[in-house]
Image: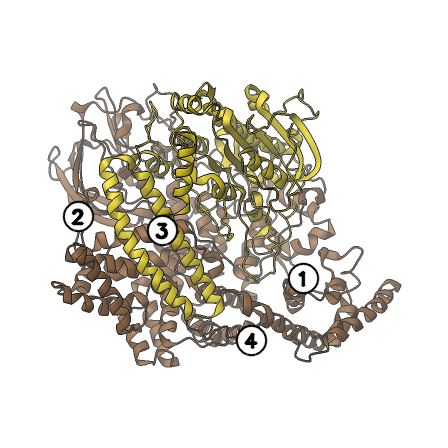
Amino acid sequence: MSHRVADLAEHFAILLLLVLTSSSLSSKEPDERNPNSDNFLIKYCMECHSHPSPEGDFRIDLLLQTKSKDADLQKWRDLLERLESREMPPRGANKPTEHEYEQILAQIQEQVEGIERATISQQTRAMRRLNRDEYVNTINELFGIRYRPGDDFPIDGSVEGFDTNAEGLHLSSSLVEKYLNASNEVVARAFRLEDADHKPRVTKAIFSEENHFYPNEKQLGALSVYNGNAHLSFENAGVKRIVYIGGPSVFFYNVIDPIGNSQHAFNTEGVYRLKVTLTPRSFKIGEVASFTILGAEKRLVSEHDVSILENGKPITIEADGYYDRTEGLVGFELQWTNGNHLQWPSRGRLLDLPFDNSDQNKPWWHINYRIENGKRVEWKPQTPEELPFSYFERVEFEITGPIRETPSATAKLLGSYLQDEDAARVFERFLPRAFRRPVTPAEVQRYTSLVQQQRNKGLDATSALSVGISAALCSPHFLFLIEAAPADSPFGSYLLSDHELASRLSYFLWSSCPDDELRLLADQGILHEPAQLNSQVSRMLGDPKVESFVRRFAGQWLNLNKLSSSMPEPKLFPMWSDDLQKSCREESIAYFREILLKNRSIEEFLASTWTFLNEDLAAHYGLQPVEGRKLQRVELEDSRRGGLFTQAAILTLTSEATRTAPVIRGAYVLDRIFNRPPPPPPANINSLIPDASQARSVREHLSIHRSDASCAGCHARFDGFGLALENYDATGRWRTEELAYEDPSRSLTRTDQSQAQTFMIDATAEMLDGANFDGILGLKEYLLSRKEDFLRGLAERLLIYGSGRKLAVADRPRIEAIVKEARMDGYKFHRLIQAVVDSQSFRTR
Amino acid sequence: MTRTISRRKLLRSATGTLLGLPLLEGMALQSRAATGAIDPPVRLIWIHTESGVWMPKYKPSSVGEDFALTEILDPLAPLKNRLSVLSGLRHANAFKRNPQTGRHLQDGLCHLTGADLGGTPGVAVRNTVSVDQLAAEAIGENTRLSALNLTVDRSSTLSFTQAGTPVPAEWDPRSIFTKLFTENTAEAKKRTADRFERNKSILDDVMESTRDLSNSLGANDRRTVDEYLSNLREVERRAAVMKDWSERPALPQPPNTKAPGGIPENDRTNYVRVMLDMLVLALQIDHTRIATARIGFMGCHYPDIGCPDSYHGYTHHDSRKDRQDAMAKVDRHRIGHLAYFAEKLQQIKEGERSLLDSCLIHYGAGMGAEHESTDLANLLLGTCGGIRPVGHIDYGDQPLSNLYVRMLNAAGIPITKFADSTGPLPIS
């Protein structure tokens, strides 16, 4: 032992004595420490982690002195994690025996639990309100309407990565005001109260040669050019026509009748009927034209196959689309099967890229290249027939809407509401659903008398009833997930009642209220029985409502929502488009859905021999062509794909616009796979970093950073994951060469990339635990070797999402039980979810 | 009757005119003529740019009125006689470590609150009131809207209530425009009145059942429910104010006013300017006198000016000149937004002066581009409320909160203390 350590040990022996004296008054004091644990820390940790130059800014000496346990809770947790992973003490240092490790871990765990009992139980607000998605799903399920008021609500805060935590679900008067307004709008829609805003209107737009549309974009008001990816265009001089319609929001926001110059405003959400009449011009007779109508997020609305029997004879297709303000609704996209034209690569991109609205007098479209196999090829159409969409001589659109329908759930709810006396029956039916529990006669009475008051004021029966329903929708019993824990019961000690459990379960897997079956089992008081719970979980996973779980959990767990703000630089990544971005996102979602619905092993998140592709994605990945834009499951022969970390969505959202960012990718693995996010970098970070402006590659660059010991401590834990992914560029394409880091083409001053300086990628990595691997194959193997850690990470994420709270050290043994159970069933996803639901951690508050 | 309404009545009888009405040209003249010399009210605007500013190209090298504008500040050249560049201000509390929010979130969370968020890990972060809300409480009742909060990043706001909960900001220019003008038809007034009656019945019932529920809960849950109750009361109060306003003459729409088309999602420059246009309109018709605007955030990309990576990506510049230059370019671009905004205000006449003459516009970052919290980029545009431009002044190391105290004092709000302030910042 060095002198320094000996001095310190002596110094702390005195301090320790003081601490113990002051806390030994009560033997139940939660922060009382076992002196053995202090000995361990002094022996193994103090040399590096103490004044004056503590490694990683982590001071064991302070930790041992301090009396303020709450403030140090996080540090104790960090300490626990570092010891648990055996990362500390580091390689090369004096290592404790396995027995010593186990002892110290048990001791610290106990201490930390004590601190948590004393702090968290008093301070965590476990009761939460519904979040935006849950609110919307719940009212739509209750009334059978499709209304998304949540889009106007403030965005819910995310705590520990999810929007189900009370701490992120703030209340504000503007939100409460929106609840109030929404409650009025819900009943207006459900009960079809008259409102001028909702009268359906009809708008027609005809595009034909006689109309002389679109000499330039000034007159192109017919379809917006904002996003540059959705156009319908006919050239003025009567030469040729291009029809390309796509890009969801565009179509719906900006359809103008070129004759009457009136705009069909899509302010009101609801069903709109689209009728399109196309007059074919140059189809082969007998050819089948396939028209596809796509909705928000490119989801299929309908498909129409029409045989073209005669050119010049109009074809009409119709579809209903639901307009939705944020999802941008429903675009309308025509695709047709016509030998040549399916070959046309990267639909939309052709017209998209050359679009330039800087010059008002230039024709807005001037095609001068096309994209083949991901590369730009100079190309100018010589004859009109070469244009991909020159096949119609006349296109008519007719839009009618919003169209109201009678919502069936509401009809059921209202039942035979004819007389005022029937109001009680309506509330007897409605309140248990809305409040997710049985209600008392007094509660029913409260609402019927409210309705009666309105009647007395002269309101008609339906309007009066609707006031009562609105009031119920603003009630805290509806808006909050109320769990009747006895006053201030200690953390985790209250077992949820069956009705509370039904809500927790249905908001976990459906993000909506419990259905009749769950409520019935809760009414009977048997939902909590393990067999019931298991079979309900199975049933719920088979219900279409589980799609909410798929999109919401996968989206937040994998941070897919960030993808839409990734903007790969177009000059470096010409393939990237809004369409491709959506396909990427949908690949990851479909992948998650497949593993969940088919009850696959969660190992397949890390490595698989299949994925979901469409034509754009297959081209992006350089794989065998896939036909059509629908994502389909494809068996892979190439093991460079398959697994989350080969997916373009994840590789892109962890990159910068012009380059990859191995640090972000590495941190992502640690965070999302193992649920062990690295701590944030220290303040004034740039001043710590050695000058690396001479580095050529990202790798060189990072290795310079890691020469600084204070950086290396953390970065050694995760940079390797990112470096092993260097064969994927900033949009997830495979590459073996990289542009030199300093190459000016990155700053876009040079357009000719052929002269850019390149060098071969090195994707080798070394991990803190001594593991070495090379590239994606090595990474997959390594991750699979740690599948138990991944299972734990995923179990924790599921529990955080499902229980809506942070995890505490007290949850650790329960998480181990979940891990054990899922392991015994071959890591199957359903078993994992069942084990989470079965867990005390899920079923208590 | 609420306190708000009676206060306004007092104001009306004291001045012989209604301060809440638009101070359009002519009207403002009249009001001043009628009462002697009432200056137009001071408007307070806070504009925030996230993730710092690249100081080497921002901070002037000399102090005093004759300082030379730097590359980043250059777009303000036409407004230099109204400009005070305030160096040496710090956020004392901004970066007390809170692992839950992280440094970047704290940037925006603390910018106008100066709160100490370094609380106990594992326990909910509680912010404190932001300076705009404090101002709104004091003088907000003189206008239809007590404060207008804008953002181009939907998920964020700069503004927090007394309870420390976020006040959501507006992100859709259409929705702001609608609130400015379209609610003033006779038909809308009838609708407002009917809706008011209906909502009153609903709110009465909900408040009663919320109180009942509160009594049956443990302390933690009761706190949440009580918070809901106080928000219900606030909604009720605000509804009464709105009803009161709706019975007054409509605000005239200034000539050549155009409704915005939509959110130019992929055109950040245009998006920021459309939002600032809405703010100009709101100030012009005296819809509000207090505003915050968040015009940049760490994930912002500016491919249109040759800076495709996120601003945050550039701040981790690794001593690379190209990234530092890109930061400076973006910073200059954002200062250009400020110049655009101020020049628009300058073109609007209010009596004999311009609207800009009664605005105090703070532009600043909650952290430095090096992620630090001292010597932040802060500047003030404005010449009212006793503030005279000082050119460039270096305070050495003073709390940013002192500036907020000074701004509120300039608007006639007699506060002496805000967050970590030590007194009003001397600007003269």
Tally of marks: 4
Question: In this orientation, which residue lies closer to the viewer: B209 or A150?
Answer: B209
First in sequence: mark 1 vs mark 4: 1
Amino acid on which the number 3 mark rests in the picture: Glu
User: Which residue corresponds to mark 3?
Assistant: B236
Chain B, which colour? yellow
Pointer 1 and pointer 4: residues touching (CB < 8 Å)?
Answer: no
Give how far across and how far down residue B405 sits, in percent.
59, 39
Mark 1 vs mark 3: same chain? no
Q: Chain of mark 2?
A: A
Pointer 4 and pointer 3: residues touching (CB < 8 Å)?
Answer: no
Amino acid on which the number 2 mark rests in the picture: Glu
User: Which residue corresponds to mark 2?
Assistant: A194
Q: Which mark lies nearer to you, 2 or 4? A: 2
Q: Which mark lies nearer to you, 2 or 3? A: 3
Mark 2 → mark 4, Cα distance in angstroms: 58 Å
Chain A, which colour? brown
User: Which residue corresponds to mark 1?
Assistant: A770
Mark 4 → mark 3, Cα distance in angstroms: 48 Å
First in sequence: mark 2 vs mark 1: 2
Mark 4 vs mark 3: same chain? no
First in sequence: mark 2 vs mark 4: 2
Q: Is residue A844 above or below residue B150?
A: below
Pointer 2 and pointer 3: residues touching (CB < 8 Å)?
Answer: no
Q: Is residue A347 above or below residue A796?
A: above
Give how far across and how far down residue A590 sits, in percent.
38, 56
User: Which residue corresponds to mark 4?
Assistant: A813
Mark 2 vs mark 1: same chain? yes
Amino acid on which the number 4 mark rests in the picture: Pro
Amino acid on which the number 1 mark rests in the picture: Gly
Q: Chain of mark 3?
A: B
